[in-house]
Amino acid sequence: MAELNENAAAEVAPEGDGSSADAPRPQTVADPIDTLQREKGALQDRLLRTAAEFDNYRKRMDRERRELSEYAAAEVLKDLLPILDNFERALQAPVTGDTDALRKGVELIHKQMLDILRKRGVTAIDALGADFDPNFHQAVIHEPSGSHREGEVMEELQRGYLIGDRLLRPAMVKVAKPS
């Protein structure tokens, strides 16, 4: 047993014991400090990766929650648009003396509907006079015209809407073609 202790002492002897400084240190006994430093590095790496994964998960969940909310709101708002269209048609009707109070009531409701849509991030697409864009317009009529450019929207038959940057409903338009 004494021989074993002497061999172990010789293996871990300090460099100043007369042995050559260039001589490699025997690797029979693993250095506990190196082992602990490797373990520490591995654990720090795992911790950083786990924190990054959690941060990515949190951001993805926030984005999905926001998109789901926007989608649900878009469906409800899309159902309100035909009502708004009917109000706009009613407001375009000729005004007579006995319908003035009715018209004011319809205008008030129309204004309230527009305010609700604006509050929810819905904006109308300005189509009249713009170049036809299939991403925002649905051409239902192509008509020759000498006073409009080719592909210009001549008339808006039904207003289109965006919610944020997403298309809620395309504008139904009449488009000029060469005469």
Image (cartoon, rainbow, N blue to C red):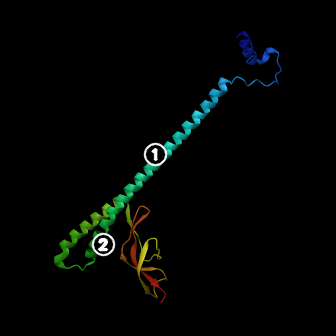
Q: Residue at x 79, y 14 (%)?
A: 17
* Residue 29 vs residue 2, the one in the foreground: 2
- Whichever of callouts 2 and 1 sits on the residue coming sooner in the sequence is 1
Vertical arrangement, residue 122 with respect to residue 29, above or below: below
| Location of the N terminus (image quadrant) | top right
Give coordinates of residue 114: x percent, y percent: 31, 65
**Residue at the location (40% across, 78% down)?**
173
Mark 2, other Cα within 10 Å: few <14 / some 14–19 / many ≥20: some
Q: Where is residue 142 in the image (x, y as percent from the top left)?
A: 43, 84
| Secondary structure of residue under mark 1 | helix
Instruction: Tell me what residue is drawn at x 54 percent, y 36 percent.
Output: 47
- 149 above or below 113? below
- Please give the residue where the numbered disc 2 appears in the rendered image: 85
Residue 120 seen in render: no
Front position in the image: 28 or 150? 28
Q: In this rendering, would 59 be left or right of 16? A: left
User: The disc labelled 1 sits on which kind of residue?
Assistant: Arg
Q: In this view, does 60 lie to the left or right of 102?
A: right
